Image (tube, rainbow, N blue to C red):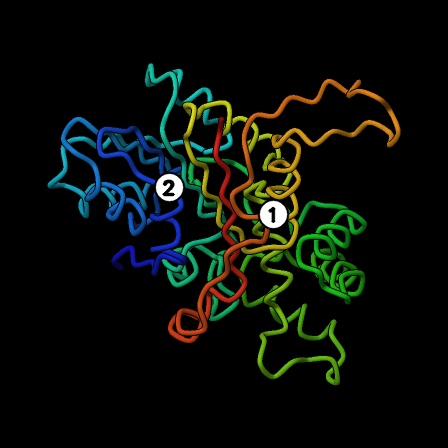
């Protein structure tokens, strides 16, 4: 299967990066190279693009798509380790960084990756297939309270407790090894009157387990800080989120890096020592146009926030 992924907020990201033709840019979620193919077009031969992805299949597809360009560096890794990656590549600072968070269309559609609640496939959900933790381990080994918490917080699923309870009951009898088994448990845990015809009942739980497997939320605030550290003066950081917790982490990090004084009102001078490291270009996030949402339903929850380092 070809690695196909329709890039969300493409023109908005390219504009937000404010690309300099001789600059160094990072696509920290390379995927099918949709965003990267537009970045590289705007770079001269002395410019450089660093493409990072934890999915080796994505890297292979990107190399094929961008094979005519010689100024691309491909790196198998996690954008959460951006400082270590740049140190490994002996790159000090860059002009722009793009992070398109969440799962790709390819990963969702490639059934054997176990991200999809459609069909019957092995429970996997690993973006990086070299890591040990997978969805099957989470579902079969996490305590009931842990599962309920993850499904509620990451999936915003109101029936998280019932789902977690039924998972634990079922796994005592037989290991839950496939997506179909998990879907059947979820479906029987949600009362019929609360099932939304426009949304699959397993959607929220699958999202939650995927986020846990790939540790998508916990490191994000620090990843934003580290990314800003890696920027040159005037460099831009563009981050697309698809989940409220992701967006909150990005928003909070941007606000903190903007250096807002947190002193009590009435003090004659600032005593908190807050340092301004840049400015939040997007006070309100950029969202897809109505046309993009209609063309690509997966873009509906997307939000783009842009930060510029001083």
Using the image, determine if residue 250 lies above or below residue 190.
above
Quarter of the figure with residue 274: top right
Mark 1 or mark 2, which is nearer the start of the sequence? Answer: 2
Q: Secondary structure at mark 2?
A: helix
Q: Which image quadrant: the N terminus?
A: bottom left
Residue at 28% across, 29% down: 23
Left of 226 or right of it: where is 71? left
Q: Residue at x 30, y 31 (%)?
A: 50
Question: Residue tagged by mark 2?
Answer: 17
Q: Which residue is drawn at the image coordinates 68% and 80% (left, top)?
A: 195
Left or right: 127 with respect to 14? Answer: right
- Rendered location of residue 288, percent (x, y): 46, 64
Question: Circle 1 — which element?
Answer: helix
Cα distance in 3D space between marks 2 and 1: 20 Å
In the image, which disc is placed on residue 246?
1
Label 2: few (<14), some (14–19) or many (≥20) C-alpha neighbours in 10 Å: many
Q: Position of residue 100 (x, y in %)?
A: 44, 47
Res 109 quadrant in image: bottom left
Q: Nearer the viewer, residue 158 or 124?
A: 158
Q: Which dot, 2 or 1, sits closer to the camera?
A: 2
- Mark 1: few/some/many CA within 10 Å (<14, 14-19, 20+): many
Left or right relative to 63: residue 80 = right
Residue shown at the point (58%, 74%) measured from the top left? 200
Residue 117 locus on image (x, y percent): 52, 66
> Which residue is the extreme one toward the left?
68
Check the image and report above or below for 275 versus 72. Answer: above
> Do the residues bearing badges 2 and 1 touch, measured as CB atoms within 8 Å?
no
């Amino acid at each position: 299967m070809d690695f196909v992924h329709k890039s969300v907020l493409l023109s908005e990201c390219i504009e937000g990066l404010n690309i300099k033709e001789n600059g160094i840019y990072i696509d920290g979620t390379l995927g099918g190279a949709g965003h990267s193919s537009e970045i590289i077009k705007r770079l001269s031969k002395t410019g450089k693009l660093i493409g990072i992805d934890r999915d080796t299949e994505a890297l292979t597809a990107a190399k094929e798509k961008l094979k005519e360009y010689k100024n691309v560096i491909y790196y198998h890794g996690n954008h959460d380790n951006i400082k270590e990656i740049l140190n490994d590549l002996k790159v000090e600072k860059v002009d722009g960084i793009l992070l398109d968070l969440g799962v790709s269309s390819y990963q969702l559609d490639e059934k054997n990756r176990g991200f999809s609640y459609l069909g019957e496939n092995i429970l996997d959900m690993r973006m990086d297939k070299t890591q040990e933790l997978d969805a099957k381990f989470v579902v079969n080994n996490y305590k009931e309270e842990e599962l309920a918490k993850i499904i509620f917080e990451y999936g915003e699923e109101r029936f998280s407790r019932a789902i977690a309870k039924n998972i634990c009951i079922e796994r005592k009898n037989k290991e839950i090894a496939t997506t179909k088994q998990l879907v059947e448990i979820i479906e029987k845990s949600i009362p019929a009157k609360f099932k939304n015809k426009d949304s699959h009942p397993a959607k929220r739980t699958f999202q939650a387990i995927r986020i846990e497997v790939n540790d998508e939320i916990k490191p994000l605030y620090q990843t934003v800080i580290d990314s800003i550290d890696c920027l040159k003066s005037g460099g831009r950081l563009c981050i697309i989120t698809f989940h409220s917790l992701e967006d909150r982490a990005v928003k909070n990090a941007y606000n903190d890096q903007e250096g807002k004084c947190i002193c009590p009102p009435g003090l004659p001078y600032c005593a908190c020592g807050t340092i301004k490291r840049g400015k939040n270009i997007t006070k309100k996030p950029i969202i897809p146009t109505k046309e993009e949402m209609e063309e690509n339903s997966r873009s509906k929850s997307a939000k783009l926030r842009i930060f510029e380092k001083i």
